[in-house]
Amino acid sequence: MISFNDTIKLATRMFRTRPMRTWLTILGIGVGISAVVILVGLGYGLQKILLEKIVFGEAMLSLDVVTPPSQVLVIDDEKIQEFRQVPAVDDVSPLATFNSSITFENLTGSVMIRGVEPSYFGYAGVRLSEGEFFEKGEKNKVILSSAILKLFEMEPADVMGKAVNFKVIVPAKDGTTREVPLNKQYYVKGIVEDETSLYVYASLEDMSSQFVIPFYERARVKVTTSDDIDPTEAIFLEKGFLVNSLSKTVEQANKIFQGVQVTLAIFGGIALIVSAIGMFNTMTVTLLERTKEIGIMRTIGASNLTIMILFLSEALLMGFFGGLSGVAIGVISGTSANFLLSAVASRMGGQPIDIFSFPIFFLVFMIIFSAFLGVLTGFFPSRRASTLNPLDAIRYS
């Protein structure tokens, strides 16, 4: 039986005797692996961009309970107290929405004013692009959506800390409405990055002190653990409310992106198949060139297994180095693309963005898979080499 050191010396001899062909074969495998790495890295990058828009933690443990369109059920203070009594419910944070006008300096526009408690921001996964959230007890602070700034053609610096006024249209339970001017000035404390909707977050406690809130549009229900989400959701659905869960949204998004990653990997796999065919061809040519050598090794006592291990070792090394080069090419290409795109985005006034992401476990898997692919493509030539008749192999020229 040939020793391990001798096996390594013989398996690496190809780098000395046929360096050009060996490195070209490794490069061919590397190109195929890099195609898979780049395309799947694109899928991971897009997934990461989407999920970064979602704040984890408390938001993942909350349910969004909404009044059904039929208005048969409404969420009022009595219902809020009822929600708090549901098993596994840790907290409830309601949201009341009203049509309103906002006045800033000499500018006036129509917006939706949303009355919330400070805890609502964490439960709903609200994120700020500027400033801070108002805290409990702060009754004269508001947070604007960036769409309002776009409406007034202003920058965040133009409104942060500045005073605004509101007139709220309050509906009554009998269907009538009345206009209620909020009798104080409010100061802008933060900006939500949302250019699609015109709305303002204000203190629910402050709004309820100035007029009666007949009902709430929705409530964020925080449960104790992630295991409580499904049972609690079932309870609220049975009561007739509509329920949305951020964790379900994330789960569905992950499933979609898994499909995207598989599809991209299939396209990259086409290049990998071509590379594998090239490696198979190289191993077959190597077998033909070393037929006489194999015959000599067999006559001096080398077993079929020894010959097979020798060829498989060569294939394993080429596959392994092909995987390393492919991962390096893919990561360098993706990182360079991220750098260029971020530079362009920053120059145009946008935020830096990385559309390629390469998890470590995926890169390690690709290196291992490449080594396995090398063994797989080298199996038939190695098996053929191990079964050669020694006398025929010696006479081969």
Image (cartoon, grey):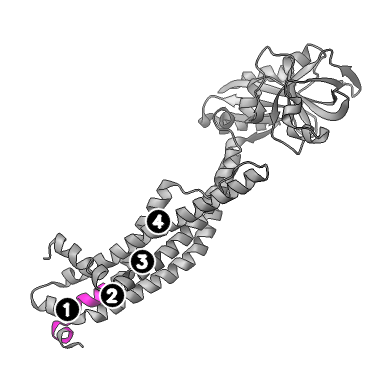
Q: Position of residue 133 (x, y in %)?
A: 65, 22
Q: Is residue 64 magenta?
A: no
Residue 278 place in picture, x, y as percent: 39, 73
From this viewpoint, is residue 353 visible?
yes
Whichever of labels 2 and 3 marks the residue nearer the N terminus, that label is 3
**If you read the primary sequence from the N terminus, does the residue marked by circle 3 or circle 4 appear first?**
3
SS under mark 1: helix
Separation (CA) of disc 1 from disc 3? 24 Å
Disc 3 is placed on an element classified as helix
Residue 239 as seen in the image, left or right of residue 214? left
Q: Amino acid at mark 3?
A: Ile
Observer-nearest residue: 56 or 109?
109
Query: Looking at the image, is 258 positioned above or below residue 116?
Result: below
Is residue 117 toward the left or the right of residue 173 in the image?
left
**Residues rendered magenta in the picture:** 381-393
Closer to the eye: label 1 or 2:
1
Earlier-in-chain disc, 4 versus 2: 4
Q: Earlier in the sequence, mark 1 or mark 2?
A: 1
Category of crowding for the residue at label 4, using alpha-carbon neighbours closer than 10 angstroms: few (below 14), some (14–19), many (at least 20): many
Judge left or right: residue 143 versus residue 173. left
Number of the front mark, 1 or 3: 3
Residue behind mark 3? 26
Q: Amino acid at mark 4?
A: Met
Going from N to C along the chain, the mark reached first, 1 or 3, is 3
Pointer 4: what residue?
A: 366
Q: Which mark is residue 293?
A: 1
Residue 55 rendering spot, x and y as whole percentages: 58, 33
Q: Is residue 255 among what the camera can see? A: no
Callout 2: SS? helix
Discs 4/1, front = 1
